[in-house]
Image (spheres, rainbow, N blue to C red):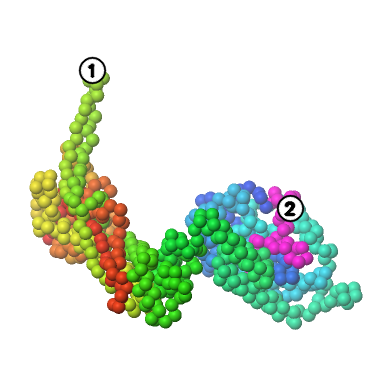
């Protein structure tokens, strides 16, 4: 149950929460910068509830405010969150946490700490500036008491209730619930309460008169009645159940007919009946249908047009494959109409079949027609599985990409990789003010992209049984396989010449060589002395223009046999003895590849600033691709996975190698 921040008009014209929408007290609620706000701690004190009377379900409700009445154990356990307008549907709606709560002077007050999230910081800024001060509580009532009847309206008091959450709201139902100042002017507070009472009297049909249960009113029986508390209690429970049923039914109807979540929430908060909501749904469906008709008429296309239908079928198929793998999908409203279609039914739509296939034979015939005719279903199907293949390939992170830079290739010919030297240094001007021309050298290496491929098969059973989960699993495995293939290809290229790497065109010497100053003269384990020598060698490397590169290593590359030694060396640990301190702790990142054997280890600078290795794909492609090779037949559907990948050595100055001990 909530003290709602969304007031709704009841049949008698009473608007809960409307007491804050008036001029004289606006200065009370819209005060600037509450003085209890602590910018450093990101906290603010607030009045959670004053127990003010609120209209609900045809009755008036009050909250008892006392230490005995309110259960705040959830606050003590750190389980009471600050929400955005009672919305608990997502963690994004959590704005902070209630750190304390207590009863003081007939009010439930406490402290709030804002979350260090975008939503939390936004709410904190609005509270700090005074733009948002309204507070509302969410709670569960365990004991109700009927206290009085006013003009045939029952007054119920929650004598025992549990605090579940606190919300920041634009318009609180309890006019006294707000963020606090440390010192409040009693006269202002009294004036505010009197104004609230005046407002209630203005919106209530007549001046309220309390009829105590123990003392019947002297007025005639039809006007005032004595109501025993015990028999009346079930009516509250019935009302709660009815409200829950209304909310559940409206939510179910709205989602089933594609209503926006905001529209469903608005109807719930407005107290809309189920019958009235059905009318709203019909109006919304009619409006959407009219908009669709107008748009189609305007652009001269309809859902029967393959240019429109094809992308929608593809989108729905991708979404269904995601869901079959347990992932969440968010198809567009236009594509959602095909989400309930099986694969064979999508094929039937693509070929404009007059009816949906019902038997296994009809499904097979639909597939044969879809793949043998000029329909766009092969394009739809291959587009969907390519989207899933690319998604899985992209998230795979092969080790070699930590060491190499990407540069794509225009075609399959060998590509010269130009490495310009340093920009020439500044030279003094001549006496005549003439600027002298400098020169810079350049070197080139050659790298080639190679086409690769493999054929796979989707069986007839997988397609006819609409087993999208199995199809998606095959595609996902292919995406991972291609990434691992790239990794294997790269390290095979790198391992030539007994691990020294390919021969460079620059000087006809392997990448790692003593002539390059990047190969250790003697083998050594990973320790401060040996790694320091490698770091010094990298800093001493010179560019093509003869200028010192002066770059420190960032990556320590090892194989599985040296993984533990490398991690111990690079871990940011505090040693108890000065002699055990590693000066490289936290400065080097350990990268492990199972393609490296033995004790060898290598150092590399950050590839962002230069690399010894380059990799790339054929220009225009960002992932492997699937092509339908043969139409649907007796044995199923044969497809091929194709990929164009290249890698090679382009420099020697960005790495250092020690064969290890």
Name the quarter where the N terminus is drawn: bottom right
**In screen coordinates, is 508 left or right of 316?**
left
* Closer-to-camera residue (441/234): 441
- Residue 18 position in % (x across, y down): 72, 58
Mark 2 and mark 1 lie on one chain; the one further toward the N terminus is 2
- The answer to which image quadrant residue 559 occupies is bottom left
Q: CA distance from mark 2 to mark 1?
A: 81 Å
Residue at (20% x, 30% y) in the render: 438
Badge 2 local density, few (<14 within 10 Å), some, or many (20+)?
few
Could you say whether the residue bearing mark 2 is in a helix, strand or loop? loop
Residue at (28% x, 67% y) in the render: 629
- The answer to which image quadrant residue 292 occupies is bottom right
Residue under pointer 1: 431
Residue under pointer 2: 22
- Residue 387 position in % (x across, y down): 36, 63
- Which region shows up in magenta? 1-28
State the residue lying farthest toward the top: 432
* Closer-to-camera residue (317/564): 317
Query: Would residue 635 be counted in the magenta stretch?
Result: no
């Amino acid at each position: 149950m909530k003290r709602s921040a969304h007031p709704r008009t009841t049949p008698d014209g009473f608007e809960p929460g409307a007491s804050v929408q008036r001029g004289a007290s606006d200065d009370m609620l819209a005060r600037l910068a509450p003085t209890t706000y602590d910018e450093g701690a990101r906290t603010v004190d607030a009045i959670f509830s004053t127990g003010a009377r609120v209209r609900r379900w045809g009755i008036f409700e009050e909250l008892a405010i006392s230490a005995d009445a309110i259960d705040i154990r959830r606050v003590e356990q750190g389980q009471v969150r600050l929400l955005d307008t009672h919305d608990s549907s997502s963690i994004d709606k959590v704005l902070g946490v209630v750190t304390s709560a207590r009863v003081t002077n007939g009010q439930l007050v406490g402290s709030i700490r804002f979350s260090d999230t975008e939503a939390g910081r936004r709410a904190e800024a609005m509270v700090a500036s005074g733009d948002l001060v309204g507070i509302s509580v969410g709670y569960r009532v365990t004991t109700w008491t009927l206290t009085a009847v006013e003009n045939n309206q029952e007054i119920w008091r929650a004598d025992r209730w549990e605090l579940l959450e606190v919300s920041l709201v634009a318009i609180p139902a309890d006019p006294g619930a707000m963020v606090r100042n440390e010192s409040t002017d009693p006269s202002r507070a009294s004036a505010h309460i009197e104004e609230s009472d005046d407002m209630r009297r203005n919106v209530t049909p007549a001046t309220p008169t309390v009829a105590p249960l123990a003392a019947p009113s002297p007025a005639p029986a039809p006007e005032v009645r004595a109501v025993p508390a015990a028999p009346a209690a079930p009516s509250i429970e019935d009302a709660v159940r009815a409200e829950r049923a209304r909310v559940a039914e409206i939510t179910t109807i709205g989602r089933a007919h594609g209503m926006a979540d905001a529209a469903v929430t608005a109807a719930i908060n407005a107290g809309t009946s189920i019958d009235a909501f059905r009318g709203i749904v019909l109006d919304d469906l009619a409006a959407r249908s009219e908009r669709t008709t107008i748009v189609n008429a305007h652009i001269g296309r309809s859902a029967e047009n393959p240019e429109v239908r094809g992308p929608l079928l593809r989108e729905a198929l991708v979404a269904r494959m995601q869901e079959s793998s347990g992932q969440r999908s968010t198809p567009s409203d236009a594509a959602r109409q095909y989400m309930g279609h099986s694969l064979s039914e999508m094929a039937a739509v693509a070929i404009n079949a007059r009816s949906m296939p019902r038997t296994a034979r009809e499904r097979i015939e639909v597939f044969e027609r879809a793949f043998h005719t000029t329909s766009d279903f092969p394009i739809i199907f291959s587009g969907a599985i390519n989207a899933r293949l690319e998604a899985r390939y992209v998230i795979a992170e092969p080790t070699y990409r930590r060491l190499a830079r990407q540069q794509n290739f225009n075609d399959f010919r060998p590509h010269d990789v130009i490495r310009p030297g340093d920009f020439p240094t500044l030279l003094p001007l001549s006496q005549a003010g003439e600027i002298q021309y400098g020169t810079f050298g350049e070197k080139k290496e050659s790298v080639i992209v190679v086409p690769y491929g493999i054929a796979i098969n989707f069986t007839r059973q997988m397609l006819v049984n609409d087993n999208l989960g199995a199809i998606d699993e095959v595609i996902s495995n292919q995406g991972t396989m291609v990434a691992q293939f790239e990794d294997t290809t790269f390290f095979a290229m790198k391992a030539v010449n007994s691990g020294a790497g390919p021969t460079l065109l620059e000087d006809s010497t392997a990448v790692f060589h003593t002539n390059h100053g990047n190969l250790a003269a003697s083998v050594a384990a990973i320790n401060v002395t040996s790694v320091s020598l490698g770091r010094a060698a990298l800093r001493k490397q010179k560019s093509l223009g003869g200028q010192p590169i002066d770059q420190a290593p960032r990556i320590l590359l090892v194989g599985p046999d040296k993984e533990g030694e490398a991690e111990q060396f690079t871990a940011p640990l505090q040693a108890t003895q000065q002699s055990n301190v590693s000066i490289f702790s936290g400065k080097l990142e350990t990268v492990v590849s199972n393609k490296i054997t033995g004790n060898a280890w290598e150092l590399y600078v950050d590839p962002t600033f230069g690399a010894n290795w380059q990799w790339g794909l054929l220009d225009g492609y960002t992932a492997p691709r699937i092509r339908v090779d043969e139409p649907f037949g007796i044995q199923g559907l044969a497809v091929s996975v194709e990929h164009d990948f290249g890698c090679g050595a382009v420099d020697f100055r960005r790495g250092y190698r020690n064969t290890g001990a």
